Amino acid sequence: MQNQVTLSIVMPVFNHADDLKIMLNSILDNSYQDWELLAVDDGSDEETKETLKQYATQDKRINIIQREREPKGAQTCRNIGFEQARGEYIVFFDSDDYVAPYCLEQRVKELSKHPELDFMVFRSGTYYDNAFHQEPDKLNYGYQIYNDDIEAFCSRTLPFIVWNNIYRRTSLLKYGISWDTHLLSLQDAQFNLECILSGMHYAYSTLAPDYGYRTASTGSVSKQILSAAHFESNLYATKRFYSLIQQRYRHRYDHALYRGAMFLYVKVSRTGFHKDYNLHLASLIQSLSPLWGNLFRWQMRLTHFLCKIMPLTPARRLPILNYLLWYRRMEQEMVKRQKELL
């Protein structure tokens, strides 16, 4: 029987060896020592594989796991790592980020003080220019700034990302929470929303930010949401969100879900006006929420018309100006609330 550990760190790995070294070094520099790292390789290049081997040779707590089942992607890797995890607690980290030297210790200590909780949310900062930044930023997460986390997730103004959290492994098993392998992106939001909807109890920590989100990474899945290959996945993610929410709350969050769909539209439209994708998205929303679906369809038709008589950028922005102004206000309010809480 394998020895038990207190904390399991599950981390998908795919290329970017230099970023990986920074993340591994930051984990090794932590004050807390009772952990295992399950580094699940998603088919990396030889340089990255060799980097993993070197670190695993030097520290036996680092375990390399090769993904041997489909589909390819971080979501499959996280499921594989979770299945092999032995820790009482579990965290899901990204291989191109950074953790502060006190991260693991403060998370384990805080959650161990609260046996009534299934997971806890910790504040994050950003990582760029080879430094960890904790000052307020629109890319910081884990601050308790929203009145309704469900509404925030529906709107895609995310209260926290999966790497903000530490979970009890038994709680994830009890509630049957796993990563949806049909999603090519947006997995974090659905995972955390399912945790909340399942009835898991959680709380926000007010301690110092302990995780650095790398803002300049070229390998982030969140940037791949702009690619055509992710269009079907985006439609699937939208349908899943509507299904999860409406099964429990009916149409209570339809406005927020519309804003979430608008967020995806804005991201994708940065690469151009994709008429077929936009019409598919409009039809999907209309079938699930006629009021907001009709508005979305009208906005897409107006955009298509304006594209014929003016440049793409104003043609795209004018029909959704109210949403864009709302989103700008939300970002400003987010940073303002972070300043107040700090």
Image (tube, rainbow, N blue to C red):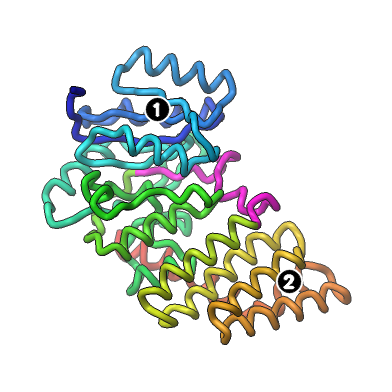
Name the amino acid, label 1. Answer: Leu
Which residue is disc 2 drawn over? 316
| Relative vertical location of residue 6 with respect to residue 314 in this rendering, above or below | above
For this rendering, which residue is in front, 188 or 181? Answer: 181
Q: In terms of secondary structure, where does tag 2 sit?
A: helix
Task: Please report the residue visible at 34 percent of the width from the left and 56 percent of the height from the top.
Answer: 142
Local crowd size for mark 2, using a 10 Å CA cut-off: few (<14), some (14–19), many (≥20):
many
Instruction: Give the amino acid at mark 2.
Output: Arg
Q: Which residues are magenta?
A: 211-231
The one nearer the camera, 293 or 119, is 293
In the image, residue 267 lies at what x, y percent? 63, 60
Residue occupying image coordinates x 38% and y 26%: 25
Q: Residue at x 36, y 44 (%)?
A: 211
Q: Position of residue 24 (x, y in %)?
A: 40, 27
Question: On the image, numbered disc 1 is attached to which residue?
Answer: 24
Badge 1 crowding class, 10 Å Cα cut-off, few under 14, some 14 to 19, many 20 or more, is many
Q: Is residue 64 above or below residue 312?
A: above
Query: Looking at this view, is 332 or 221 the one in front?
Result: 221
- For residue 291: magenta? no
Q: Is residue 94 left or right of residue 107?
A: right
Q: How many marks?
A: 2
As drawn, which residue projects farthest toward the bottom?
291
Judged from the image, the secondary structure of the residue bearing numbered disc 1 is helix
Q: Quadrant of the C terminus?
A: bottom left
